[in-house]
Amino acid sequence: MIHTAIGNGPMAGIASGTLVTVIVQSSSTTTSLMVPLAGTGLLSLQEIYPFTLGANIGTCITALLAATGITDNPIPGLEIATVHLLYNTLGVVIIYSIPVLRQMPILGAETLAAVATERKYLAFVYIGSVFFVIPVLLLSLSTLL
């Protein structure tokens, strides 16, 4: 059933990721459920990638649903949720319309996985630098300017 939903091309993967995320209302849960399937080889990275992009769109729809629950002055919340949805949807359209951009995240993930398999400490260096060091440096730089 998963192969039918996800393995039927990128559009089916994006639609499946969007639908599942709208149902469970969490892109983290949706994506986390796919990681073991990719890790065991049941699904390929090329099949999981569109599903993950769909999960990002689905989480925007969840934000839009949450914005409809605002009773006092709902306009700003609906505007932000709509911009969030349009931004992510256009991002997916742009990424999938340019073949070079479509392959870059997959190539990056495969390269990082190969390097991390050989030298595990480099995975920690990558995570530490990308998620902690660089943001702190950029925030520090922005406060100085």
Image (tube, rainbow, N blue to C red):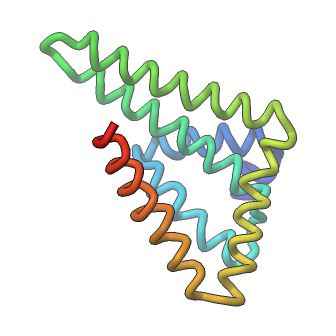
**Total tally of numbered discs in the picture:** 0
Left or right of 44 in this view: 113 = left
What residue do we see at 57% from left, 78% from top?
123
Q: Which is more toward the observer, 1 or 108?
A: 108
Residue 1 visible in the picture: no
Image quadrant occupied by the C terminus: top left
Q: Position of residue 44 (x, y in %)?
A: 78, 64
Instruction: Name the image quarter holding residue 54.
Output: top right
Image quadrant assignment for residue 70: top left
Residue 97: image location, x then y, percent: 81, 30
Q: Residue at x 28, y 42 (%)?
A: 143
Q: Is residue 130 left or right of residue 110?
A: left
Tell which residue pokes out farthest to the front in this image: 144
For the residue pair 8 and 53, the one nearer the viewer reads as 53
Residue at x 76%, y 57% (from the top left corner): 106
Q: Position of residue 85 (x, y in %)?
A: 50, 26
Can I make out residue 132 in this image? yes
Up the image or down, 109 lies above or below 85; here it is below
Can you name the residue that lies furthest to the left here? 72
In the figure, 36 relative to 144: above or below?
A: below
Taking the spot 66% from the left edge, 37% from the top edge, the residue there is: 15
Q: Is residue 74 left or right of residue 107?
A: left
**135 or 13, which lies in front?**
135
Residue 117 percent across, percent down from the top left: 69, 86
Q: Nearer the viewer, residue 51 or 75?
A: 75
In this rendering, the answer to whether 4 lies above or below 110 is above
Image quadrant for the N terminus? bottom right
User: In the displayed structure, would residue 28 be above or below residue 116?
Assistant: above
Which of the 4 image quadrants contains residue 59?
A: top left
